[in-house]
Image: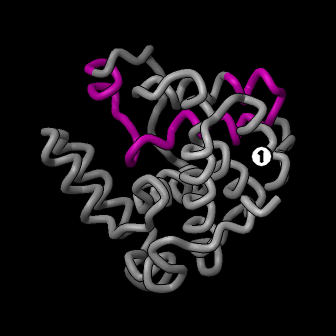
Amino acid sequence: MSRNIPDESTCICILRDAGCKKRVITHCCTVGAVADEMLREIKADRRLVMAGSLLHDIGRSVDNGIMHALIGSEMVEKMGFSADLVNIIKKHTGAGLDDTDAEEMGLPPGDYMPRTIEEKIVAHADNLVSDNRVIGHVHSVERLRSKGAFRGAERMETLHWELSRLYGMDLDVIQDMIGEYPKLKWLSN
């Protein structure tokens, strides 16, 4: 398996070159800031998590619907990057999509569930960000419940507490630690 993983500044260039709007790039950088904080206490491959966080929504340059994750994973795969990075992007939606979710949403058969610690960190960092604002997990859980996505809401709640245990406290404290609108070091480049 290839270990070809772009560094953080290269990821920003890739997003721009792909045609991502500034709003999407800002969102990706905010997810990166949340993931970076998680990595202070959770042992994982930092370079992989940061690249996954920054590139997770690259597919939004083509599609803003549920297909963006699959499209983004295919884009990154065509660029020759690591299969681990491809999988992070493919599996970042919510706390993953089970076979029933994938079928209901019109996705082709495949594995859309985050399984590695890196996949889980990126998926949940994304759950803790709304646009460019760091939020508590309950906001995302309730949004899923309001749409009738009860299985997804339960998976998200479970993922939140799994990662919170590894972090050593409730991950909702990240908003207090880095701020509701954190400074995004990658956008100064």
The residue at 63%/73% (across/down) is: 183
Magenta residues, dominant SS class: helix
Task: Kindly state the secondary structure of the residue where label 1 is placed.
Answer: helix
The residue at 64%/79% (across/down) is: 40
Q: Can residue 103 be seen here?
A: yes
Q: Residues within 10 Å of mark 1 (few under 14, many from 20)?
A: many
Residue 50: quadrant of the picture: bottom right
Quadrant of the image containing the N terminus: top right
- 5 or 67, which is in the foreground? 67
Report x, y in % for residue 48. Answer: 73, 53
Judge whether residue 80 is colored magenta: yes
Residue 182: quadrant of the picture: bottom right
Q: Can residue 88 be seen here?
A: no
Q: Which residues are magenta?
A: 75-104
- 20 or 76, which is in the foreground? 20
Left or right: residue 110 versus residue 13 is: left
Q: What residue type is disc 1 on?
A: Cys
Judge whether residue 102 is colored magenta: yes
Left or right: residue 161 versus residue 176 is: left
Left or right: residue 123 versus residue 101 is: right
Report x, y in % for residue 31. Answer: 55, 58
Position of residue 179 relative to residue 153, above or below, is: below
- Residue denoted by label 1: 11
